Image (tube, rainbow, N blue to C red):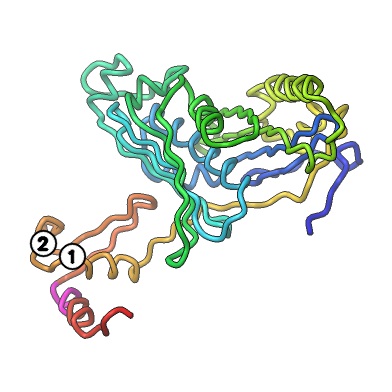
């Protein structure tokens, strides 16, 4: 059981509480919510790829959205958010395990991106993603959420079209079509240049109306519930980008500023970290599922079969001796049960 802490309590001093989710509940409004803030994990994931800023910021927003949605569920496995489209950014994938391992990557067409941003010479440079970038950078596509809890369970998947100018708008489309409870989401992300190099910050604030019974408000009429919900959304929307991304402003203090008059309660926070799940054993399994003669296209200039993890850029190389051992092992594996 998690402890419940009053947001009006003392001890709201500045602290670094990034790469965490802070769940909260507004008893007076019958609303629950989450504040997600990511920092060092974004640096570790995004900067290793050297993405243009117009690709990196949508990835940062998608990652914080992934955490915000995943932490609203009870699951034991992997929550995946995937955006695919026919625009300059073809594919964006991020996932979070129930153990708190976060990763993500993007695939894009450099020339299409430069054209979309109005950059000359085929290069996007340091141009940021424009406001309302979803139609311009992703084009026509879809947003997919998947919960995978292992081989012996059925995967849950939700798919909605990319409708709206922002990822938050696309997520709202999902909740309108797939969920029964009104939900509001605000997402911000920014890359700052510091003396120690670039630093990423992203944050998401989510409010969701609770079922009447869970909220202990079965005697509240529908008009009052709607008024309370509108108030919660207005308070959420009043959070500024500066507040949500301020490294010197603790999450507790931000929530206290927004919701202290609404009987806000803060639950135990949960931490996340950038960690890829790739390994040589996993790559072995992938290669064994492919006929050896079909690996020719994967060979590099030295004749090695090279496989690079899209998420962390780790490269796994196999020479002919490695492949001999791999396929001999595959041939000797017992048949699947």
* Residue 248 x, y percent position in the rendering: 72, 34
> From where the camera sits, is residue 192 visible?
no
Residue, x 39% and y 52% (percent of image)? 312
Q: Which mark is residue 204?
A: none
Work out which quarter of the rendered image holds the C terminus and state it. bottom left
Marks 1 and 2 close (CB-CB < 8 Å): yes
From the image, tell me which residue sits under label 2: 294
- Residues at marks 1 and 2, CA–CA distance in whole angstroms: 7 Å
| Crowd class of label 2 (few under 14; some 14 to 19; many from 20; radius 10 Å) | few
Q: Main secondary structure of the magenta part?
A: helix
Report if residue 323 lies within the magenta region: yes
- At 61% from the left and 33% from the top, the residue drawn is 204
> Residue visible at 56% across and 60% down?
76
Part of the protein shown in magenta: 320-324
Is 302 colored magenta in this rendering?
Answer: no
What residue is rendered at 29% in x and 17% in y? 119
Q: Which residue is mark 1?
A: 290
Q: Mark 1, residues whose alpha carbon is within 10 Å: few (<14), some, or many (≥20)?
A: few
């Amino acid at each position: 059981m998690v402890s419940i802490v009053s947001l009006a309590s003392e001890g709201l001093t500045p602290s670094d509480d990034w790469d965490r989710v802070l769940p909260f509940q507004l008893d007076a409004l019958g609303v629950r919510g989450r504040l997600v803030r990511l920092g060092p994990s974004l640096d570790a994931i995004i900067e290793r790829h050297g993405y243009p800023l117009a690709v990196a910021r949508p990835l940062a927003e998608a990652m914080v959205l992934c955490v915000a949605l995943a932490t609203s569920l009870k699951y034991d496995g992997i929550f995946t958010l995937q955006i695919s489209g026919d625009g300059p950014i073809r594919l964006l994938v991020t996932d979070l395990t129930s153990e708190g391992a976060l990763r993500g990557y993007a695939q894009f067409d450099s020339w299409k991106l430069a054209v979309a941003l109005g950059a000359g010479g085929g290069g996007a440079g340091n141009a940021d993603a424009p406001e309302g970038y979803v139609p311009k950078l992703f084009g026509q596509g879809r947003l997919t959420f998947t919960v995978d809890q292992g081989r012996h369970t059925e995967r849950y998947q939700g798919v909605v079209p990319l409708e709206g100018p922002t990822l938050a708008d696309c997520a709202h489309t999902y909740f309108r079509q797939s969920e029964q409870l009104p939900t509001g989401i605000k997402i911000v992300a920014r890359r700052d240049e510091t003396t120690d190099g670039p630093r990423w910050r992203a944050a998401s604030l989510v409010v969701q109306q609770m079922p009447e019974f869970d909220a202990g408000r079965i005697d509240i009429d529908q008009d009052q519930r709607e008024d309370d919900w509108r108030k919660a959304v207005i308070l959420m929307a009043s959070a500024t980008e500066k507040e949500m991304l301020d490294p010197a402003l603790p999450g507790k203090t931000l929530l206290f500023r927004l919701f202290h008059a609404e009987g806000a309660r803060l639950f135990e926070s949960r931490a996340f970290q950038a960690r890829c799940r790739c390994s040589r054993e996993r790559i072995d399994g992938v290669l064994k599922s492919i006929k050896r003669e079909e690996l020719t296209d994967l060979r590099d200039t030295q004749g090695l079969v090279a496989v690079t993890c899209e998420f962390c850029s780790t490269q796994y190389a196999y020479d002919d001796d490695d492949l001999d051992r791999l396929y001999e092992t595959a041939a000797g594996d017992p048949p699947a049960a």
